[in-house]
Image (cartoon, rainbow, N blue to C red):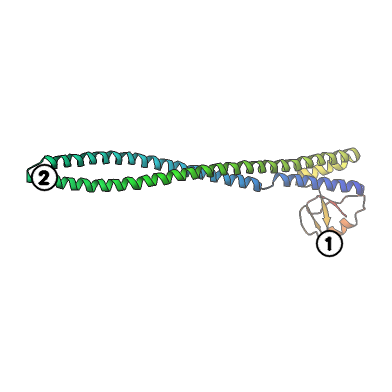
Amino acid sequence: MKLAPDHQRLLLELADTDAALVADRAEPILDEQKELDALIAERAKLRDGAAVSKMGVEDLRRDLVRLDNDLAKLERRQKADLDGLGAATDREDRRDLEHDLASTRRRIREVTGERESMRRRIEATDLNHDTDGALFDEIEERIAAATRARDAALHGRESVYTDLRTKREDLRRQLAETVPGALDAYDEQHGSFGVGAARFKGNSCTACYLVLPAAGISGIRSTPEDRVPRCPECGTWLIRG
């Protein structure tokens, strides 16, 4: 292909721009997106923990109501035993009442201890709920900040892509206006191999990255400056210099 050196540089710049566009679309997930995803997962885990905790404290409150009811029954039983002792004169009746009173008082102490322990657990859980609320507020703020950072990074990436597209169209316009045949040849090679043109560097082609045989290298180097040689291995147009 006959092409002036200045136009060869345009062709190579177009190839570099096409390669940059492909690389930009294949960029890995943004670090900002990874940070946002991690925070969202942390929030979900916190919500799950809060839900389990809430279910647990509801169970504790139901158990506390049950203990309150048991304690009220025991206190009524204790009063009945004391009233009975105040009125009983029969020794056997008094012995039965005293035995029942002692058993009731022992059970009252046990239930009172259980109730106090459960009350402390409920207070601790309520305190954890308050802490969870503060953590929720904090993580929501962090998610909002991470979302803004991710959006800014996406905007920056899209801006780069837009600039590359604009540059590509400008290069294609210049080539179409000056050497349309060269652009057609470039497009044909790009369509078949994915690379339209590449640098000839040292003794290798930067499209297929193969070290070329001595005869091929000699042929490329001896090609007149206003003509573009092809890689003998992959057929890509090679730009020297």
**Residue 22 image point, x, y percent:** 73, 45
Tell me what residue is drawn at x 88 percent, y 57 percent: 221
* Residue bearing mark 2: 94
Kind of element beneath mark 2:
helix
Q: Looking at this view, is 17 or 181 the one in front?
A: 17
> How packed is label 1: few (under 14 Cα within 10 Å), some, or many (20 or more)?
few
* Numbered tag placed on residue 98 in the rendering: none
Front-lying residue, 220 or 69: 69
User: 132 or 187, which is in the foreground?
Assistant: 132
Q: In this view, does 234 lie to the left or right of 174?
A: left
Report x, y in % for residue 1: 88, 47
Quarter of the rendering containing residue 75: top left
Residue 120: % across, % down: 38, 47
Q: Is residue 2 visible?
A: no
* Number of marks in the rendered image: 2
In the image, what residue type sits under mark 1?
Ala
The answer to which of 125 and 48 lies nearer the viewer is 125
Measured from the top left, where is residue 136 in percent x and y?
A: 53, 42
**Can residue 64 be spotted in the picture?**
yes
Upstream in the sequence, badge 1 or badge 2?
A: 2
**Which amino acid lies under the numbered mark 2 shown in the image of this protein?**
Arg
Q: How many neighbours does mark 2 have within 10 angstroms: few (below 14), some (14-19), or many (20 or more)?
A: some
Residue at point 7% right, 46% down?
A: 91
Left or right: residue 47 compared with residue 170: left
Say which residue appears at 80% left-offset and 48% top-offset: 16
- Give the number of the mark in front: 1 or 2: 2
Which residue position is annotated with label 1? 214
Q: How far apart are marks 1 and 2 (CA)?
A: 121 Å
- The structure residue drawn at horizontal position 77% and vertical position 39%, both measured from the top left corner, is 162
Left or right of 114: which side holds 141? Answer: right
